[in-house]
Image (cartoon, rainbow, N blue to C red):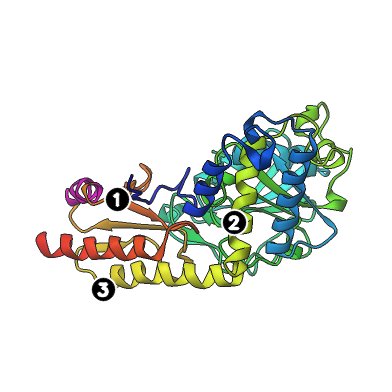
């Protein structure tokens, strides 16, 4: 069976080595005579899978000891509620709007307190990251919230905002593990696994210990309290056990292949191939200005609207799939997450050149 290049924004490609290993272990995990899917989450074997996953993630990201790592459910979207419910002690927070995901997080936070929009790029359909070095941070704000990589629009913060000492909270769903990160700059980082890490159903939260308290929004459900998950080491209830197992394999795969410094180099190289071509093409145009470009999600259009659909259809026949852009942006989007091999991007650009020649 042949694998194709899947440019989906998520769920997205996973490393072949990881999938193969999981396939080999599917019926009989390490002589247990059962699949990880069939295993008690309280068993010794599973405990080892979970512990090892956390340990390897800590190693990969160099996570300081005063941060907890939680493997939760509910996707990125549930974090939009958990964050204000758990962190809004003054019932006020500052949000920066750089796209749909940030807007959704902002709307959710409004259910729990006062929300200030301190910067936005909505005026240009979110095709850039606003200036964040001289923000008016509100005195009473409990935290400043950003969506660090904007999956739909193809933008990325290349430096984090100056929060004037306030806690920085970041949705890193679509850039998680794509490059080294200084965790100590953040109070909380979260990422839904299905973009750059593993299967859907797992969301990873990295949270500074002092932010985990019992002092939460009144009547916050037990399941939505960071403290309950932290106290129980992500085993308060049945965790997304199989998903965590796959995430753990991806962490190992990254460590084995040079960690995040090496990953960042490869990701830069991959993105450069596509951006360099887009910048000189007469037919294709990138939609994001140079300073704000994401390495993970690359958005572009053709200069003739009617060619977009034709391009997407023809690319599919060449084994280059899921290149359709999000309906809010239109055009095309190529997601180049960690598991997309260099050859995949090269194949895409070869096809784009050919398409350009044929459709002058
Ligand atoms: C996909 C995505 C989400 C939403 O994730 P779900 O797991 O579907 O809730 C949130 N933020 C970003 C940046 C995303 O890319």
Real-space Cα separation, disc 2 to disc 1, in angstroms? 25 Å
Secondary structure beneath dot 2 equals loop
Tell me: residue 110, above or below residue 309. Answer: above
> Residue 97 lies in magenta, yes or no?
no
Find disc 2 in the rendering and name its residue.
Answer: 176
How many residues crowd mark 2 within 10 Å: few (<14), some (14–19), many (20+)?
A: many
Q: What residue sits 72% from the left and 48% below the top?
A: 93
**Which of marks 3 and 2 precedes in the sequence?**
2
CB within 8 Å, label 3 to label 1: no
Find disc 3 in the rendering and name its residue.
Answer: 280
CB within 8 Å, label 2 to label 1: no
Asked whether, in this view, residue 215 is left or right of residue 196, the answer is right
Tell me: residue 117, above or below residue 218. Answer: below
Ligand 1: image quarter: top right
Determine if the C-beta at disc 2 is less than 8 A from ligand 1: no
Residue 206's x, y, as percent?
73, 52
Residue toward you, 343 or 114 = 343
Residue 218's disc number: none
Q: Quadrant of residue 237?
A: top right
**Which of marks 1 and 3 precedes in the sequence?**
3
How many residues crowd mark 1 within 10 Å: few (<14), some (14–19), many (20+)?
A: many
Secondary structure beneath dot 3 equals helix
């Amino acid at each position: 069976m042949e694998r194709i290049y899947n440019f989906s924004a998520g769920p997205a490609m996973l490393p072949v080595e990881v999938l193969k290993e999981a396939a080999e272990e599917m019926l009989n995990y390490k002589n247990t005579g059962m699949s990880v899917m069939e295993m008690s989450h309280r068993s010794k074997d599973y405990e080892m899978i979970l512990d090892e996953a956390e340990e390897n993630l800590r190693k990969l990201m160099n996570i300081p000891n005063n941060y907890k790592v939680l493997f939760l459910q509910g996707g990125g979207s549930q974090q939009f509620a958990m964050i204000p419910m758990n962190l809004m002690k003054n019932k006020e927070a500052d949000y920066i709007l750089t796209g749909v995901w940030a807007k959704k997080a902002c709307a959710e936070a409004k259910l729990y307190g006062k929300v200030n929009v301190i910067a936005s790029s909505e005026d240009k359909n979110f095709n850039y990251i606003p200036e964040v070095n001289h923000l008016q941070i509100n005195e009473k704000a409990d935290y400043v919230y950003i969506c660090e990589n904007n999956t739909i629009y193809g933008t990325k913060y290349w430096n984090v905002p100056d929060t004037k000492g306030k806690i920085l909270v970041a949705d890193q769903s679509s850039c998680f593990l794509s490059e080294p990160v200084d965790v100590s700059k953040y109070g909380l980082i979260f990422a839904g696994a299905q973009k750059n890490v593993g299967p859907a159903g797992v969301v990873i939260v990295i949270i500074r210990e002092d932010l985990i308290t019992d002092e939460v929004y009144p009547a916050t459900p037990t399941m939505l309290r960071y403290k309950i998950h932290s106290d129980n080491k992500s085993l308060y209830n049945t965790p997304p056990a199989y998903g965590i197992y796959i995430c753990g394999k991806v962490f190992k795969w990254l460590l084995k292949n040079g960690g995040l410094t090496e990953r960042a180099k490869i990701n830069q190289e991959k993105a450069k191939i596509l951006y360099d071509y887009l910048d000189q093409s007469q037919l294709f145009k990138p939609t994001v200005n140079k300073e704000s470009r994401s390495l993970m999600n690359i958005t572009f259009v053709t200069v003739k609207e009617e060619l977009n659909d034709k391009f997407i259809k023809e690319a599919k026949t060449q084994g280059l799939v899921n290149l359709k852009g999000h309906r809010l942006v239109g055009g095309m989007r190529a997601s180049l997450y960690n598991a997309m091999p260099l050859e995949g991007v090269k194949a895409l650009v070869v096809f784009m050149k050919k398409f350009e020649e044929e459709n002058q």
